Amino acid sequence: MTSSVNKVEFFVGSLLPALILMIIVNLIILPLSGTDGINIPIYVLSTTVASMITVILGFVIGLLAKNQMSTSLISTPFMLIFLLLPMFSTFNEGLAFVSRFIYTGALNSILQKLVAHDSYPVTIENILVMAAWLIISIVVFIIAYRKNGIDK
């Protein structure tokens, strides 16, 4: 199926279009949101890392799903957890604690501090959480690809 393309080229070729589109949307959202004076390099870097993690996790779900129909069924609980948990963390201390260790929670923390013009919007904890999620998602993708690769 992909005889002229190796695995790394296929991965990068699949990742880049989605990632570039997400970066463009993140940049368009910035002026539309009405926020001004935020640190744009930190915004772009943090949203790009979170977008990469999201796309890679989407790859994993796609590899593990039996067909296209089951992909949306499998991905819905993950989307709800990753997207809603940081929002609901303001209402519950337990959710706030858990949200600190999810990449969307770290991103939410960074974005809130950027909007508040905090002089240090990124903490060591945020960096470690995002880096750990990026590494873990890549490792899980490699395992899922070896088990259920597109050529199988």
Image: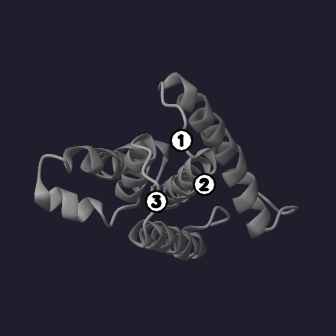
Query: On screen, 110 above or below 68?
Result: below
Residue at screen point 55% across, 32% down: 30
Which numbered marker is on residue 38?
1
Relative depth, front residue between 59 and 148: 59
Q: Which label was assigned to residue 147? A: none
Pointer 3: what residue?
120
Quadrant (top left/top right/bottom left/bottom right) for the C terminus = bottom right
Residue furthest toward the front? 119
Classify mark 1: helix, strand or loop.
Answer: loop
Residue 64 percent across, percent down from the top left: 46, 61
Is residue 1 depicted above or below 35 in this figure?
below
Label 2: few (<14), some or many (≥20) within 10 Å?
Answer: few
In 3D space, how far apart are the residues under numbered discs 1 and 2 (Cα atoms)?
Answer: 13 Å
| Image location (x, y in percent) of residue 147 | 54, 74
Number of callouts in the render? 3
- The label on residue 45 is 2
